[in-house]
Every structure is written in C-alpha cells, then in structure tokens.
Image (cartoon, rainbow, N blue to C red):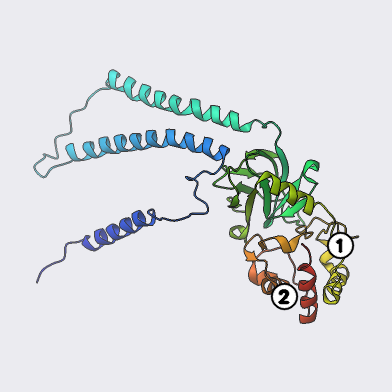
Amino acid sequence: MRLRRPGAGWRRWALVVTAALVLAGCATGELPQNTLAPEGRIARVEDNLWNLVFPIAVAVFFLVQGLLLYALLRYRARPDDDPSVLPRQVAGNTRLEVLWTLIPALILAAIAVPTVKTIFDLSQKPASPLEVRVIGKQYWWEFEYSDEAGNIVTANELYIPTGRPVFLTLEATGQVTDDPSSIGVIHSFWVPKLAGKQDLIPGHQRTMTIEAEKPGSYSGQCAEFCGLSHANMRFAVVALEPAEFDAWVEEHASPQPPPQDELAARGAELFTSRTCIACHAINGYEGAEARVGPNLTYFADRAKFAGYILETTPENVAAWLEDPQALKPGAQMPDLQLSDEDIEALVAYLQTLK
C-alpha cells in the first residue's frame, strides 16, 4: 500500500487558495471604487505618489525576503552536522551595520520628502473653490452647500461641477444616547476615484479637496466602522458640466410647492400629523425644518436613498416606510406603524418632491 506523505493535502490546498487569490486580483471591467484609476486632479496627485512608493516597497520586500531565504537555506542544519558543535560566533561587522542603517535611512528619506510635500500641498485650500459642509451621521451623509450654491441641503448625493475644486469641511455626529459623554461616532469619507480618505472625528472639523475631470457618478462610502449599518453608509459624487451644475443649483434652491394631487395632498397632511416632520426638513414647507434625518426637499430626484443602498422606486419607499429596520438594521428611522393606506399616501407625496 502506498503511504501518503504527511502534509501533502495541506500543500495542495495552500496552492489552490493562493491561485484563487491571484486570480481574484485579475478582475477586468469597470470597478466603481478603483483607487488605481484616478478621475480627478487630487486623486491623480495621490496616485503619482503611489507610483513612486510602490516600486520602492516591492524592491525592498524582495531584497529582504531574498536575503532571508538565502540565509535559511545556506545555513540550515544538515543531517551530518555535529549537534555538540556550536556555529562560529562572529562579532559585529561595523561596515555592514553602517550600510544596513544608512540604506534604509536613505530609502525613507526618498519616500518622506515627496510624501510630506504632497500632504502639505493637498492640505491647502484651493483658489475659488465650491464649498460644501459634509456631516457624517448614522448611517447616511448630509451635504450642505455654501450660500454661493444656493444654500442647498441634500443627502447621500453630492453634486459638483467638473474642472473646479470642491473644498469640503467635514464633521461627524452620531446617535444621541443617555450618556452625556457620548457625542457621536467616527466616520471616514472616501471617494476612491476622486481623493483619498479623510477621517471624521466627533467634535472636530476636517477639510479636504476633491475634483472631477469629467462628468459621471463616482461611488463613495464610509471607510471607518461606525456601527451596525456601517456597510450601508454609502453615497455618490455626481459630477456635471459647469452649465448643468448651475442649472441644478437654480432648480434645487427653490422652495417646494404644495402637492396638487389628492392622494399626495393627503400624504403631505400625514407628513405633518405624524412624526415625519419632527426629523425631516423640506424647503418652503412650514414646520419642516428639522435636520435629524435627511432633507427631503428633492427626495424623488435622488437615484437612491437609505444610505444610498435602495433605488428610489415607489416599491422600495413603501417597504422602507413599512419596516425600516428590515432593510437597514440599526437605522435611526423608527417604525411608525403606518397602515397600507397611509403608506400609499406618503409614497405619493414623496414622489412629488422633485
């Protein structure tokens, strides 16, 4: 009977897993959050720094691992070695010690100089930017435009003009608790194709600049664990040509007129009589100025809602109103115990907000 060598099965599985990991990195096609495919000036500056640092890191890795493997193989114990004889002890080699101290220091200096320069360059506020205040909440993003852009407040969709820097002031708030020391949770704002990450710390303001070179929708998300629905805290940066962006600002800066349809009008009445009005703002709607939940002024214009995970269809909106926790665990939206008729009316009203 042929005996199976010990460990042969593990080696085979290790080979399979390694091959699978290598093949998984060979994906083709459009990747919505591909950091290595910059679409803006800021992302391109950061990518240039990566292009410098990565080859150096790879060279250092292979050099160190090669020397390690050489030492392990060249000086390994052999069957005919006398175990009572210790290896020859060698005192420190001054020349080698100087070399392996000086070479890493030079490598780090070569990396540090462009890195520090890039950090300082990107931290500067650009000339004539569009200014937007970004507030990370649980679990969605709020975008508040400056007076220049009509003082618009929206959620989960950040509209920007192409070819112009957008200066973001970022803050973090979180769930209100009975603990007076709790002032929120951390988030991390990340649009891979437009810029690197920026952490949001409760009680502190952070700034960063993003810029898009061409029109399109750029996927973003929270990149720092912030609670139960962290994975459902997404957003999109929608870049428009400057003329289209100006038209978007003009359209979205106007107040929302009252609905004319009978069913939608009943939904508007429900919006004020139930607790909706206590959390959501609607421009031009008396009594609806709260900022606890997303601003709903132009809700129907948004491609997605609920942390940008659900398409804004009547069916999804109805399902959300019926049981928010079933669609997004941990969301701050309560279950209002609405009847089917109330949900139908509210959906009809929300569909008019555009």
Note whether 332 is above or below 93 in the view shown: below
Pinpoint residue 39: horizontal percent, then vertical percent. Answer: 54, 44
Question: Which of these two is toward me, 39 or 172?
Answer: 39
Q: Residue furthest front?
A: 243
Q: Which mark is residue 257?
A: 1
Is residue 181 visible in the rendered image? The answer is no
**96 relative to 109 in the view: left or right:** left
Question: Which of these two is toward me, 327 or 34?
Answer: 34
Which amino acid is tagged 1?
Pro
Element type at mark 1: loop
Q: How many marks?
A: 2
Pinpoint residue 215: horizontal percent, then vertical percent. Answer: 60, 48
Q: Find the distance from the CA under tag 2 to the CA under tag 1.
A: 26 Å
Dot in front, 2 or 1: 1
**353 relative to 101 in the view: left or right:** right
Of labels 2 and 1, earlier in sequence is: 1
Q: Which residue is labeled 2 in the image?
A: 322
Image quarter where the C terminus lies is bottom right
Image quarter where the N terminus lies is bottom left
Pinpoint residue 275: horizontal percent, then vertical percent. Answer: 83, 67
Note whether 109 is above or below 180 in the view shown: above
Q: Are marks 2 and 1 in contact (CB under 8 Å)?
A: no
Pinpoint residue 259: horizontal percent, then vertical percent. Answer: 85, 68
